[in-house]
Each structure stands twice: as C-alpha cells, then as structure tokens.
Amino acid sequence: QLQLQESGPGLVKPSETLSLTCTVSGGSISSSSYYWGWIRQPPGKGLEWIGSIYYSGSTYYNPSLKSRVTISVDTSKNQFSLKLSSVTAADTAVYYCATVRGTAAIDYWGQGTLVTVSS
Amino acid sequence: QSALTQPASVSGSPGQSITISCTGTSSDVGGYNYVSWYQQHPGKAPKLMIYDVSNRPSGVSNRFSGSKSGNTASLTISGLQAEDEADYYCSSYTSSSTLEVFGGGTKLTVL
C-alpha cells in the first residue's frame, strides 16, 4: 500500500518561496497508474487543488496559482516536490500530497503539513 | 469561490438518511462520470469514500452511495451513525487544463 509523507519548512516569510517534498513508499513514482498531486486547505476552510504531475513530466495546475507553482518529480529519490513562489499570508494552509488516478479520484493522502506564512 | 457547489451544512438523526449535492457544469460533473467524494474528520486527512460517481473503495461501508444526474452529483448516507459526522467534499475531473476541481465542502451534523 502506498504511503506518502510531506516534509519541508513550517514557516515561510512573505514574498519567499514555499518548498515541500513528498516521499513515496510502497510503490514507484515512475508508475503509470497515478498522477502525483498537491492539495491545500487553509485553516477552517475547504480543500483547494494546487496541481499534479504525471511520471512523464506532464503537469496540471490550478489556473489561480499557475503563475507561481512548479511541481516536479525526482525518480531517483522516489519523491515529488512543490514550489510556490511569492507567498503571502493567504498561502497559509495545510498542504497535502496525494496520489491521483486518471479519473481524478485521490486514493492516498499524506498526513498533511501546516505551512505558515509570516515574518 | 469553489468550482463545484455544495450546501454548507446538512444534518440528520441517527438511523436516518441524508443526501449531499454537488453541482458543476458540463465541463466537469456533467461531462464525465468521474466524480469523487471525500470524508474529512477534524485534524485528519480526507478519505476517499466514492469514486467514478458510484464506486466504493474497499473497506468503505455500503451505507455510502453516489449518483449523478446531469450537472449534479449526490452522496447519500443511509443509517446515519455518530461517526459519520464530518466534512464531506466532492471533486470532479475537468476538461480544463487543471485536471481536477473541488466543491466547497459540506458539514454533516448527526443530531
């Protein structure tokens, strides 16, 4: 069974770049069965789709975040990563990494990591 | 503003049935049989309850069922139990370049 674990700084300063990594265990990130995705949830609010990447490198981003988001894969480490630039307080959220089927169903979720944007 | 529209809250008594709606457009819910539903308890990661409109993953109770008509999908929970009290989110595949959209979430209260 796939397991995902997010890692990265819990505090980021405004205008800087948020960087998170998701380590995948129990399966290969080179699998064609899944997209590898990022979702976030601001405190007390709903889920927001950030984007995803396929093993081939194809990416899909939320249009509202597209200009600031980069998702990449490191097959040698079985990891994928999220970078969100020029962050503001509005980017404060719990960030989840997840596996996404081709039909957009999200099977496996990481436990989530809270990232706070504050000086 | 979320791409898919859900009621903010629903409630029901133990043993009753409730239905949560999820309304989108022909570019997402109405155009594909790729609607999913997630249950989220406080402080926990969401859990997939329904995928591809009406399929249950292994281990999910058959009290949970999904359906779709036109641009609106629905999640029905029968025989409500206290443990069903949670937030529920729908999502759908979308033909736009983003791949997926979420609903705003519905808080289910078991009275």
Image: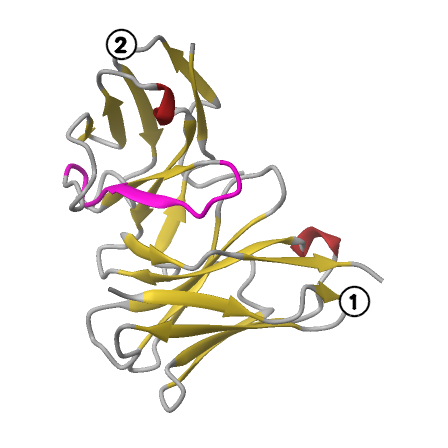
Asked if residue A38 lies left or right of residue B32, the reply is: right
Depth order, front residue of A101/A5? A5
Q: Amino acid at mark 2?
A: Gln
Q: Local crowd at mark 1 within 10 Å, few (<14), some, or many (≥20)? A: some
Is residue A97 visible in the rendered structure shown here?
Answer: yes
Whether marks 1 and 2 lie on the same chain: no
Give the residues drawn in magenta, as a range. Answer: B42-54
Residue B16: assigned label: 2
Depth order, front residue of B85/A43? B85
A75 lies above or below A39: below
> What quarter of the picture does the C terminus of chain B occupy?
top left
Residue under label 1, please give it: A13
Does dot 2 land on a helix, a strand or a loop? loop
Image location of residue A93, percent across then percent down: 62, 52
B90 lies above or below A56: above
Residue, x 53% and y 65% (percent of image)? Answer: A66
Magenta: main secondary structure equals loop
Q: Nearer the viewer, mark 1 or mark 2?
A: 2
Image location of residue A38, percent across then percent down: 45, 62
Depth order, front residue of B77/B79? B79
A55 lies above or below A94: below
Asked if residue A96 lies left or right of residue A12, the reply is: left
B40 lies above or below B69: below
**Residue A18 is inside the magenta segment:** no
Q: How is the image coloured?
A: secondary structure
> What quarter of the picture does the N terminus of chain B occupy?
top right
